[in-house]
Image (cartoon, grey):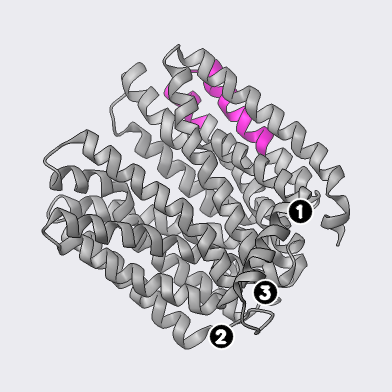
Amino acid sequence: MRVLNKFIDPDLPRLFYVLLAGRFVNMVGNSLVFPFLAVFLASRLGGSLASVGLAMGAYGVIQVASVLFGGIFADAWGRRRVMLLSLSAGAVAAYLVGIVNPLWALFVALACMAFSLPLFQPASMALVADLVPPEKLNESYAMLRMASNAGIIIGPMVGGLLADHSFYWLFALDALSLAAFWVLILTKIPETRPHERRETLATTLGGLRTVWRDKAFVGFALLWAVAWLVYSQLYQVLPAYLHIDLHFPAGIFGYLAAENAVLVVTLQIPVARWSKRFSSFNAMALGMAGYGLGFLVMLLASGLAGFALAVVVITLGENVLNPAAATWVATHAPAQLRGRYMGFQSLASRGGSAMGPVMGGALLAHGSAPWLAATVMIAGIGAALLVRQSRVSVTSVSA
């Protein structure tokens, strides 16, 4: 009970903990599938890596568009409706991906899954901002990350066992987790949107223009994309470097990824509570500096212990940066436009993640030193710009 009390804040609404529990179950199901999606597609496409690459690329492009629509829909239709739509459509699509036979049907189901699942993200983030007092947002977003990573620890281990026997169960259990979360939201979570008037095309476009004209937010979004460009080197470039250049076994990165997830689960809440002493942008700058320091460790120490230490430093950075960023967006955005702001934040992160391996791969072709040195330099510049941005946005943050 004492351990549980460390993670339960009586000042947070019960509905938040319902969302937290559902998010954990959902991420267990999602992470059953996504680590093995490329392997599944390769088996269905006869081992054609080029076709798998095209399919995964199209999947990513659809996801980028989806998060923006998810934010618009969350403001126009309500958080609850969008989350229910995302989960129900995602459950059907995920199950169909696992059972359909014609390739055209597989690609249609895959496209539906790619579009439906990311709709949930901006709606759920806006719902948290609607429910939670502003002074508790940093801790709340930290708890969401903790629940998500706890699910990610469990899902791939179970998924690996199931994938050796049948891919069907990966998608069936993912669909079941989505359906269970759908029932939880349907029965336990009411609508929290702060306004009830229907939006017209004019008000929708007007809301988008408001976001684009918000110079403080646009500056943040650009730097948020840079943060994800840097962070993506960890998950999208480092595995290839370890295996191809340093000749580690292909599975060695799995241990580093597990280390990252365990550190998020165990350290996210205490780190987020500690970082509340800083303003949001200064905390983000500190997190970005942690990214840079972590990749500097990789540059200076190429042994496996050095990479494990680098993951610790990078994880500490993300534990500071991510809750601070979500908190700033939630408090900066007008209440009636929270979904759109959250959607644009997700769009920036996915855009940065998409550019990361392009940059990293090009630099790594010239050697590890140029790749790692450039990553450290970009992180350092990003941290400096975040400190500068804190001065530009001080009025918005204090509000």
> Within the image, what quadrant is residue 91 found in?
bottom left
> Within the image, what quadrant is residue 1 found in?
bottom right
Residue 164 horizontal/vertical position (percent) = 15, 50
Magenta segment boundaries in residue numbering:
288-309
Dominant secondary structure, magenta: helix
Q: Earlier in the sequence, mark 3 or mark 2?
A: 3
Residue 294 horizontal/vertical position (percent) = 58, 29
The residue that mark 3 highlights is 130
The residue that mark 2 highlights is 190
Residue 305 horizontal/vertical position (percent) = 46, 26
Residue visible at 49% across and 74% down in the picture: 82
214 and 286: which is toward the camera: 214
**What kind of residue is marked 3?**
Asp
> Within the image, what quadrant is residue 329 found in?
bottom right
Residue visible at 42% across and 34% down in the picture: 236
Q: Earlier in the sequence, mark 2 or mark 1?
A: 2
Q: Residues within 10 Å of mark 3 (few under 14, many from 20)?
A: some
Q: CA distance from mark 3 to mark 1?
A: 21 Å
Q: Residues within 10 Å of mark 2 (few under 14, many from 20)?
A: few
Q: Viewed as shown, does residue 86 lie left or right of 127?
A: left
Q: CA distance from mark 3 to mark 2?
A: 11 Å
Q: CA distance from mark 2 to mark 1?
A: 30 Å
Q: Is residue 45 above or below residue 69?
A: above
The dot on residue 20 is none
**What kind of residue is marked 2?**
Pro
Q: Is residue 5 visible?
A: no
For the residues bearing labels 2 and 1, Cβ distance under 8 angstroms? no
Quadrant (top left, top right, bottom left, bottom right) of the C terminus: bottom right
Mark 3: which secondary structure?
Answer: helix
Mark 2: which secondary structure?
Answer: loop
Residue visible at 29% across and 38% down in the picture: 53
